[in-house]
């Protein structure tokens, strides 16, 4: 998935509303868009994108922390998790939050490109409330604020919603989910056939 999405030549296939075509011209990526021909400034490869641990551990340990932190932020701490593995790295989690509601997470790093998304929708008596889109133009400010809060928390012990305690809670939940998945996997029994006796 990473290799496909990180190749600019594939951008029109997974973002057809954005670009019609992309080609390499004189060492630069040039795209045909509704705005005309534009140059793409493509970031270098992520050295961790194709790492072994991503293939071995899959979405539970890669995108799972992001999904859990989103839901914990919206619904509060998790009292219990139930995990079920599907094909490949597909994992479904059912979370029971201490405040009473339940939430469901479906994770996969290897979904087909047409099925790739990161969405969170809360529902209740008032209807559906989708998570707002990430403000890409403010992402540097958001990360700077998070880093400042983390530094302040480490320096003076001031509690933050996203401090090391959140990371530890998420790690415990992921470890519990992994344990459930590992215990549910069928084991291969080896039967040795001996010579008949008697």
Image (spheres, rainbow, N blue to C red):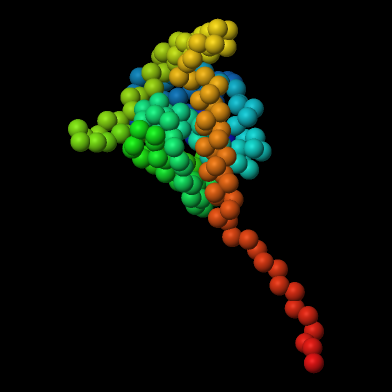
Query: Picture quarter containing residue 114?
Result: top left
Residue visible at 30% across and 34% down? 122
Task: Say above or below: 86 vs 150.
Answer: below
Examine the rendered structure and indicate whether residue 42 appears above or below residue 12. Answer: above
Q: Position of residue 164 (x, y in %)?
A: 55, 21
Q: Position of residue 139 (x, y in %)?
A: 45, 15
Left or right placement of residue 112 versus residue 191 in this view: left
What x and y, as percent, mark residue 111? 47, 44
Residue 83 lies left or right of residue 188; in this view the side is left
Say which residue appears at 45% left-offset and 19% top-offset. 161
Residue 156 sits in quarter? top right
Q: Is residue 19 visible?
A: no
The reply to whether residue 138 is in sight is yes
* Of 172 and 32, the residue lying toward us: 172
Q: Is residue 75 left or right of residue 145?
A: left
Q: Nearer the viewer, residue 71 or 62?
A: 71
Measured from the top left, where is residue 66 in percent x and y? 48, 30
Number of marks in picture: 0
Location of residue 146 with respect to 181 vertically, above or below = above
- Residue, far bottom: 198
Picture residue at 80% right of the left edge, 92% below the top: 198
Q: Is residue 54 above or below residue 35?
A: below
Q: Residue at x 27, y 36 (%)?
A: 123
């Amino acid at each position: 998935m990473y290799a496909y999405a990180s190749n600019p030549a594939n951008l029109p296939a997974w973002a057809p509303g954005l670009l019609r075509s992309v080609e390499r011209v004189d060492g630069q990526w040039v795209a045909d868009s509704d705005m005309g021909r534009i140059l793409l400034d493509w970031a270098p490869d992520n050295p961790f994108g194709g790492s072994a641990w991503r293939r071995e551990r899959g979405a539970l340990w890669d995108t799972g922390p992001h999904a859990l932190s989103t839901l914990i932020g919206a619904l509060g701490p998790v009292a219990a998790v139930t995990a079920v593995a599907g094909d490949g790295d597909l994992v479904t989690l059912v979370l029971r939050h201490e405040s009473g509601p339940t939430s469901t997470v479906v994770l996969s790093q290897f979904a087909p490109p047409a099925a790739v998304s990161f969405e969170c929708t809360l529902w209740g008596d008032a209807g559906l409330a989708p998570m707002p889109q990430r403000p890409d133009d403010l992402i540097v400010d958001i990360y700077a604020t998070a880093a400042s809060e983390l530094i302040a928390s480490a320096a003076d012990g001031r509690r933050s919603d996203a401090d090391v305690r959140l990371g530890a809670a998420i790690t415990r939940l992921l470890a519990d989910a992994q344990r459930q998945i590992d215990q549910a996997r069928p084991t291969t029994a080896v039967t040795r056939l001996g010579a008949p006796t008697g």
